[in-house]
Amino acid sequence: MFLTSNPQLNKNGELHHLLTIEGLPKEILRQILDTAESFVGVTQREVKKVPLLRGKAIFNLFFEPSTRTRTTFEIAAKRLSADVINLAINVSSTSKGESVLDTVANLAAMQADMFIVRHSQSGAPHLIARHVSEDIHVVNAGDGRHAHPTQGLLDMFTIRHYKKDFTKLKVAIVGDILHSRVARSQIHALTTLGVPELRVIGPQTLLPTNVDNLGVHVYHDMAKGLKDVDVVMMLRLQNERMQGSFLPSPQEFFKFYGLTAEKLALAKADAIVLHPGPMNRGVEIDSTVADGNQSVILPQVTFGIAIRMAVMSILAGN
Amino acid sequence: MFLTSNPQLNKNGELHHLLTIEGLPKEILRQILDTAESFVGVTQREVKKVPLLRGKAIFNLFFEPSTRTRTTFEIAAKRLSADVINLAINVSSTSKGESVLDTVANLAAMQADMFIVRHSQSGAPHLIARHVSEDIHVVNAGDGRHAHPTQGLLDMFTIRHYKKDFTKLKVAIVGDILHSRVARSQIHALTTLGVPELRVIGPQTLLPTNVDNLGVHVYHDMAKGLKDVDVVMMLRLQNERMQGSFLPSPQEFFKFYGLTAEKLALAKADAIVLHPGPMNRGVEIDSTVADGNQSVILPQVTFGIAIRMAVMSILAGN
Amino acid sequence: MFLTSNPQLNKNGELHHLLTIEGLPKEILRQILDTAESFVGVTQREVKKVPLLRGKAIFNLFFEPSTRTRTTFEIAAKRLSADVINLAINVSSTSKGESVLDTVANLAAMQADMFIVRHSQSGAPHLIARHVSEDIHVVNAGDGRHAHPTQGLLDMFTIRHYKKDFTKLKVAIVGDILHSRVARSQIHALTTLGVPELRVIGPQTLLPTNVDNLGVHVYHDMAKGLKDVDVVMMLRLQNERMQGSFLPSPQEFFKFYGLTAEKLALAKADAIVLHPGPMNRGVEIDSTVADGNQSVILPQVTFGIAIRMAVMSILAGN
């Protein structure tokens, strides 16, 4: 049944940390999506708070800056009535030569309940999870190129909201798959939830070498890859990739892989468009599409709060 | 009656955003001052909190740094029991090339209730107010040289507290009118509230070219301008103006326009002195005046919390 | 009885500010330790909050960066249900040329209840305490080389927790006594609480010239200094001291004064090891000792929260 060796699950097979979607049972993904459903209502109420995590200390441990993701976790935690401590690390402790594990051990000794960890190095949240005591939960808020599970989950929530049944969908992920932790989390989630046809579209230089091992179909041509899909998941093109050997130029990229109304017309008429943000308008996506009526980019953000509330409350409850 | 085209008012003529004092009806200014009156009591209680904004998410969106103004809004929001998210923007999202409107659209999608906006460009809060949905309120916390309405309002509160009746006052605003968003907000507020004699005092280079259109009397000489006034409103001289063509030197400025006990003696014996802070002691104001018994500079700060509580609670209630 | 001239005590001899341990009566140290004892329970509860400081505004006024100390005060204040405002000063106000006292006067006018002050200059918290009104409390969170009283108190709590009776202990403080505000606070606390034998161990260049006036025994040799002690208090070696005339090199320092298992074996078999953190592993302490079973370094952190809760609640209650 459950992978008992999964470092994210406790002895009862319940979610203890959220580090990656890879290897998570479908039941747990569904539990998170269902719990988030109940929180969508909370965030639309007059008083957007529930007392589920009152008195809990949640640390936003951001070793890499991210206003947007940090803010969504902060809001989600506050709506659960938790106390939130924001730590942008590299200012003080690390500059004093303290290791990440010493920093975390110290914060744990302050009776932290949960660490939300963003780090530029893949695996940092796993490392932290391995070293904290049993009563502390770790949530990966993005590590290197590895994983960004809450982003993957909010994407699943969005798809389910608009398309209901994963088992009937054609889904395309477009752009820089190679460097994208978001793409990795999406692929694992979509596969686990039973999407029968999953495509990745991008230039050879921006696809991992053995991406087909992940159970996806590879396309280099948007016209073919978008044909008849139900869901188009655009990725952000990182500025730092826009020069050098990966890409000729942002203009060139847009010409071939930027999502325009014309290209989107090849997908199903009711296809939805997702983007994890922040968008590079005119690079990976045209403004007419980004702001068009097939775009569900802003609902993704709204659902992202509910997903983070769900993850935090499930972890704290287990 | 009300200017229905005023972007700050809703269909019922109630305050929906606070962007500028210009064009606000006298009734609304009075409503804010009266509401603030009731909050002065709250901030002096043992437990300085009221639950008016419980569960509301208020974003301090500071595109220009300001510890002081940000802190007053943060305190005011917390005393109303709101959840406050501080965002010093230019660190992450904007550095990722996202536009101000995309940033705001994203935060709005997190179910924000109110944006407190400080921006170095005049008009930024108006732009944001035009693009947010109907259930979100925008407060201008200072934009370029344009307006700083909560500062203007707290100044009005302070004047009313000490002088009661605006319709009997001579008021002088002194210093760098040209670059001051504070001065603009003060002039609109004082005019609306019926001050019969409003003077501005400063060197030609620091006065707007057609300042007399605003209904003020222009003076270049402190001795004449301060004569018999009830209220002296000093302005901060921005460091960045202190060099180049506007001013010979800070010393020279102090000699002619710095407020000393000697110059203040020309005003009425019970005249009060205001300053929006932070003060440049020895440049626009002498320490004996700043710390003297006619100074109401620290009460301004205290009243500023009550004014911000009033504005936020009125907006959230409408 | 009490030193009525002590600027930390009110007319009734109760603690009004916490600026330094020097000169504090033993009764007050004990009151703080006993109060902290009651809060250790709170921080282990499911809901780690008590409403003692609800509605109080506590300002973390950090003129010198310190993620760790600031975080402990923030958590402690939130567990007492206070509203916490974090101000990393030198960004805005001071860069606008405002003096520390003007900054503090302004924050006080916002109806602050307590200032937690960290400053690189010795005496800054005293200066602030002298200028605030009677209803505001100041806590020194570390000033220059002068004092770090809450660190000293949490060390005392830790020692009492493991060793019960101060009047039977041999205690050694090891390392850079000269530049350490922590060491000064420890020495005053240990002396006041009746420790009969207090030793300091370090190279001549890192000891204050007349350290023996403080009632301590001076050792330059670890083998002699650690002999039969009950408590070993390591100090952090500041990076900025590691070069130049004070020290030959970190390696050299470790050889003579770094705490290894071998050197620790000279102390009593049940001796405990403290360190204020963050540690320089391999410089002042070996990892086998830092992570060994005589180390009480992480419990220090936990007790530090309780001590800060105790100090804040005692001050607010007096």
Image: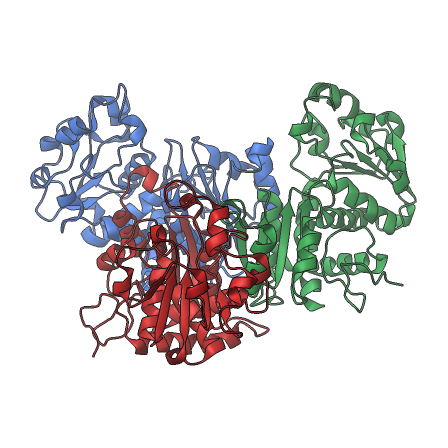
Chain colours: A green, B blue, C red
Image spot of residue B20 (x, y percent): 39, 39
Is residue C8 visible in the rendered image? The answer is yes
Residue C297 % position (x, y): 52, 64
Quadrant where the N terminus of chain A is found in the figure:
bottom right
- Tell me: residue B1, above or below residue C72: above
Q: Which of B213 and C38 is in front in this view?
A: C38
Q: Quadrant of residue A139?
A: bottom right
Does C41 sit above or below residue C64? below
Foreground pick, C17 / B97: C17
Q: Position of residue A298 (x, y in %)?
A: 67, 42
C205 to the left or right of C162: left
In the rendered structure, the answer to whether residue C275 lies left or right of residue A153 reads: left
The residue depicted at 27 percent of the width and 38 percent of the height is B191
| The C terminus of chain A sits in image quarter | bottom right
Residue C207 is drawn in which quadrant?
bottom left
- Please give left or right for residue A26 compared with residue A130 in the image: right
Residue C114 seen in the figure: no
Q: Where is residue B314 in the image (x, y as percent from the top left)?
A: 44, 53
The residue nearer to you, when weighing B144 against A172, is: A172
Q: Residue at x 73, y 31 (%)?
A: A289
Q: Residue at x 9, y 32 (%)?
A: B223
In the rendered view, tell whether residue C188 sits above or below residue C206: below
Up-down relation of residue B156 to residue C49 (above or below): above
